[in-house]
């Protein structure tokens, strides 16, 4: 597990009472732990089953550019754990002209364990809550919900074309945390991680076997990663860093470290930390991937990341360069999700044609 170092991350001034309230909430969040991540990863489906999500009445008007590289588009997807008496909920992330966003979708499936798209018909849903995250950091990327806590990174605004030009954007990002115990209405917490001078292309979160929360955040392409660990007062300090040149590969594993859109952390019952990253490689014309890694401390403020498996999947209207993510369904079952770039026409296509239905794939 990742160990504590001395460097601390900046945080906003808060009262001790507020700190303790947030810390208690974070400690109380239920996180699923898996028996055998490798077996569950291998058992995941490889052909996406479609779920249709309507954009709803509050979908931001700036999500209207259907010419690549898409000025504003969906950048992440997560499924929330079941809550008694409620429907099944998923969340999407995305940037905006003025704000970064979380989009909450309610599906016409009762909250329960197991796959959503398990029958012959296509499950339906709609965006019911549009959450504005921040106006300064208005570019939200890949994110993760783990138990009752959601962690998401947002970067200083820069349009899609300028992001293709090295040095054209002013780097700076912040990681935000939400209480999602009520999945229909996430509540922002007063705990942040500031990433001055860098970005937050994807963020993952889990509670380590030691009981402390760990966050992993990457730069724009996630070639360089930083691990943070939570302190007793609720803030986070930098614990370790890693660069893709340090990647190790398990015997018999073929593949490479790619430009990832999301990084989701999973805890195994023996304390091993796994990370599943998602991408399309090459972008637009390539294949969609779930890649599996282990994450461990290497000492001296460094981490060891080892690629242990890779799964190629077939998506229908979804694109892992847009949004994808992992849901821990139980101690033995993993379910993957992918999203299209934008609300699209039906039947779904990639690249998308203008429409009102967000195509979601379940694996």
Image (cartoon, rainbow, N blue to C red):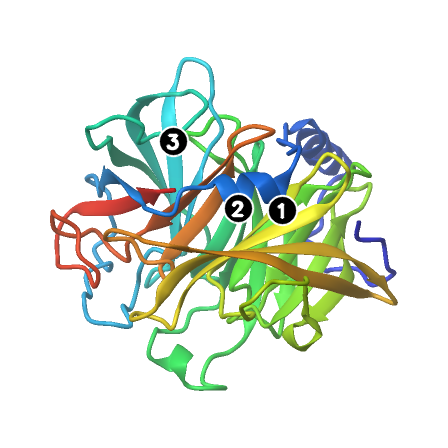
Report which residue position mark 1 lands on: 205
Residue 244, quarter of the rendered image? bottom right
- In the shown orientation, is residue 272 left or right of residue 42? right
Neighbor class of circle 3 (other Cα within 10 Å; few <14, some 14-19, many 20+) is many
Badge 1 element: strand
In front: 139, or 335?
A: 335
Report the Cα–Cα distance between label 1 and label 3: 19 Å
Report which residue position mark 2 lands on: 144
Residue at position x 41%, y 13% from top? 85
The mark tally for this picture is: 3
Q: Residue furthest front?
A: 252
Report the Cα–Cα distance between label 3 and label 2: 14 Å
Q: Position of residue 97 (x, y in %)?
A: 32, 63
Residue 138, quarter of the rendered image? bottom left
Task: Point out the image quarter for the C terminus.
Answer: top left
Asked whether the beta carbons under mark 1 and mark 3 sit within 8 Å of each other, the answer is no
Report the Cα–Cα distance between label 1 and label 2: 6 Å
Asked whether the beta carbons under mark 1 and mark 2 sit within 8 Å of each other, the answer is yes
Residue at position x 35%, y 73% from top? 159
Report which residue position mark 3 lands on: 89
In the rendered structure, which disc, 3 or 2, sits on the residue that comes first in sequence?
Answer: 3
Q: Is residue 145 visible?
A: no
Badge 2 element: strand
Q: Position of residue 44 (x, y in %)?
A: 46, 41
Q: Position of residue 310 (x, y in %)?
A: 52, 57
- In the shown orientation, is residue 295 left or right of residue 202? right
């Amino acid at each position: 597990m990742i160990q504590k170092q001395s460097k601390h991350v900046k945080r906003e001034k808060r009262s001790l009472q507020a700190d303790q309230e947030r810390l208690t909430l974070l400690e109380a969040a239920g996180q699923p732990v898996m028996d055998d991540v490798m077996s569950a990863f291998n058992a995941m489906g490889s052909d996406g089953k479609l779920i249709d999500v309507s954009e709803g009445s509050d979908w931001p008007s700036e999500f209207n550019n259907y010419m690549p590289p898409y000025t504003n588009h969906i950048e992440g997807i997560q499924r929330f754990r079941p809550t008694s008496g409620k429907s099944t909920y998923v969340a999407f992330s995305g940037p905006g002209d003025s704000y970064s966003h979380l989009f909450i979708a309610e599906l016409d499936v009762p909250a329960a364990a197991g796959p959503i798209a398990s029958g012959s018909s296509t499950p339906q849903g709609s965006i019911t809550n549009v959450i504005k995250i921040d106006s300064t950091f208005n570019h939200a990327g890949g994110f993760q919900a783990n138990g009752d806590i959601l962690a998401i990174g947002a970067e200083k605004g820069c349009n899609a074309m300028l992001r293709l030009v090295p040095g054209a954007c002013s780097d700076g990002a912040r990681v935000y945390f939400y209480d999602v115990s009520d999945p229909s209405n996430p509540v922002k917490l007063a705990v942040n991680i500031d990433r001055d001078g860098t970005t937050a292309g994807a963020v993952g979160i889990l509670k380590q076997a030691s009981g402390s929360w760990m966050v992993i955040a990457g730069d724009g392409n996630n070639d360089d990663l930083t691990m943070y660990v939570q302190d007793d007062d609720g803030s986070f300090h930098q614990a370790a860093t890693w660069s893709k040149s340090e990647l190790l590969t398990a015997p018999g594993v073929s593949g490479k470290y790619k430009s990832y859109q999301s990084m989701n952390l999973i805890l195994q019952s023996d304390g091993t930390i796994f990370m599943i990253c998602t991408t399309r490689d090459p972008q637009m014309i390539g294949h969609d991937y779930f890649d599996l890694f282990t994450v461990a401390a290497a000492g001296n403020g460094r981490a060891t990341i080892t690629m242990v498996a890779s799964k190629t999947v077939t998506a229908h209207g979804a694109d892992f360069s847009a949004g994808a993510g992992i849901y821990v369904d139980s101690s033995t079952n993993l379910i993957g999700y992918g999203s299209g770039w934008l609300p699209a026409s039906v039947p779904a296509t990639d690249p998308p044609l203008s429409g009102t239905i967000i195509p979601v794939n379940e694996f």
